[in-house]
Image: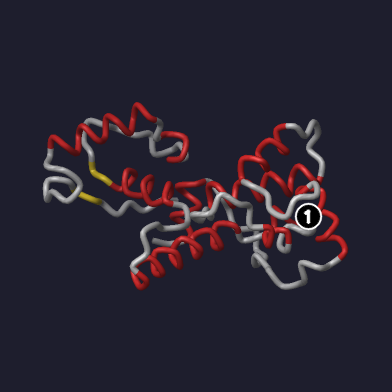
Amino acid sequence: IYVDDFVRIMGVKDGGEEVDFTGSMDDQHIVKVRNSFLGGKKLLKNNELKQIIVGTEEASDFFKVGFVMYALCTLLCPTTSVYVNLKYLLPLRDSKTIARKNWASYSLRFLLDSVRSFKENNQVYIGGCLLFLQLFYLDAIAHGSVLVDRSVLPLTVWGKVETEKMKKWLQKRGGFESDKVVVMKTEYG
């Protein structure tokens, strides 16, 4: 699995700059932004961040930072915690550089580190973008009649109906580990 696979499946790109966590959470700008999100609380739950974002009427810097933080905590780099990782404010401190960050590389590395930790430490849960792994597998199966438009981002192709069709197709062939299910390596553009 490579970064190009993550880009192709999830539609998240690298912008050329590393996702940088250097700096201090006590930096004046970080404290101000953090307090804006926390509103006097010590911790912020993911669903509370969602409500803040939904309640924001304009695409301000505050909205952009909140949106990316929410995407990281719930989709791209989720953990087992229900709380927002406020350390994401460090790489998000300048909203104008958000698009220039290597989000695909960071998200894939986070997933691979989480899988490695899961295996080495006999953990119960895996962090990281498990949706990517599911879509990567579904996209790689040679599945005959269940055709998928490969010109479209897999994240948008695999809805509930398509996934259910694939499950039935897999069950008819003996399941995920059956030798009747062929996983193919497809080269893309």
- When the figure is inspected, residue 49 is found, relative to residue 118, above or below; the finding is above
Q: Position of residue 139 (x, y in %)?
A: 34, 44
Q: Image point 39% across, 57% down: which residue?
A: 125
Density class for disc 1 (Cα within 10 Å; few <14, some 14-19, many ≥20) is: many
Q: Quadrant of residue 152?
A: top left
Image label count: 1
- Residue matched to label 1: 34
| Residue placed furthest toward the front | 41
Relative image position of residue 72 (x, y in whole percent): 59, 52
Give left or right: position of 88 versus 59.
left
Q: Nearer the viewer, residue 187 or 76?
A: 76
- Give the quadrant of the N terminus: bottom left
Left or right: 19 with respect to 39?
left
Taking depth in this image into account, of 181 and 111 the one nearest to the observer is: 111
- Placement of 169 over or under 84, stated as above or below: above
Residue lying furthest top: 161
Left or right of 30 in this view: 133: left
Residue placed at 37% from the left, 71% from the top? 121
The way the protein has been coloured in the rendering is secondary structure
Q: Position of residue 82 (x, y in %)?
A: 56, 49
Task: Give whichever of 96, 70 is nearer the camera.
Answer: 70
Furthest-right residue in this view = 28
- What SS does tag 1 mark? helix
Dividing the picture into quadrants, the one containing residue 116 is: bottom left
Q: Is residue 61 left or right of residue 88?
A: right
Instruction: List x then y, in percent, for residue 37.
Output: 76, 48
Residue found at x 66% / y 60%: 101
What amino acid does circle 1 point to? Arg
Residue drawn at 58 percent across, 53 percent down: 13
